[in-house]
Amino acid sequence: MSNYKRVLLKLSGEALAGDKSVGFDETNVMVVANQVKKLIDKGVQIGVVIGGGNFWRGRSSKIMDRTKADEIGMMATIMNALYTSAMFRTIGIDTIVQTPFEVGMMTERFSKDSALNHLKNGCVVFFAGGTGHPYFSTDTGAALRAIEIEAEVILLAKNIDGVYDSDPKTNDKAIKFDSISLSEVITKNLKVMDHTAAIMCLEHKMPMSVFYLNDEDSIVNAISDKINGTVVTV
Ligand code: UDP
């Protein structure tokens, strides 16, 4: 079924919140959990990066020092990972949350060796806290961790069903790509992930599958030939 052995799943914070757009939506998260379980049961190794937008972004305050605002954002991504990890465990998925800095006994410090050990044992590894530095995003954190753990692809779950040449919300003639190269994404300034992340993926030849999270079996299909979205090639 699957073409891949090790993947990095990137979810936005909003994906956890569902229609409420803040906090957590248990039903939404369990839909993701059940799909991840199917992949784990097939032997696919899965790392997960989650954004923080359902709680806070560095841009959320117009007046606050940006470094402080970003620190709050990184903490938001840790809450999201702790929540999702605990929800995954309710259906028997083995999980661990790793962070680039100490968070007491709540998470483990990220290391490639340890992450790979967990992954090889069928444990889902959540890479929370982004890169650990302000002025970055969880897109960049996802690119970085995917490259470090030698994932074969980033599964980019979105609230849109792929990459378009313009915004389909404002242009009803927008055209969706079945496949597009990363260099085209960058030169055409297409909204897939932020530039820092896209350039890292280009430099390190990390492909992506971009798809609509709320489609039935979207994650499972994203790593098969049944993907309903856009394949971003390198
Ligand atoms: N963040 C950060 N460094 C990172 C990753 C995330 O400072 O390496 C902060 C940043 O403030 C960001 C927030 O965490 O706005 C939530 O991350 P996400 O990627 O969801 O934010 P977005 O890209 O939507 O701003």
Image: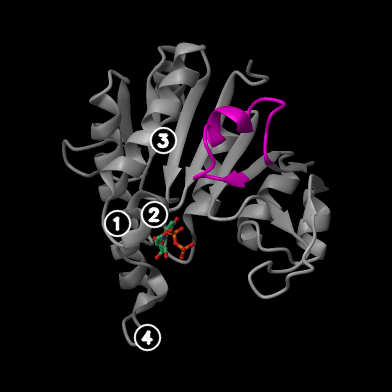
State the SS at label 4: loop
Residue type at mark 1: give it: Ala
Q: Which residue is mark 1?
A: 76
Camera-near label (2 vs 4) is 2
Residue density around tag 2, few if under 14, some if 14–19, many if 20 or more, within 10 Å: many
Q: Which residues are magenta?
A: 211-228
Residue 43 x, y percent position in the rendering: 51, 12
Camera-near label (2 vs 3) is 3
Foreground residue among 82 and 146: 82
- Residue at 25% over, 36% down: 107
State the SS at label 1: helix
Going from the N terminus, do you reach mark 4 or mark 3 first? 3
Residue type at mark 4: give it: Lys
222 within the magenta span: yes
Q: Which residue is mark 3?
A: 32
Queried on whether the Cβ of the residue with tag 1 lies below 8 angstroms from ligand 1, the answer reads yes
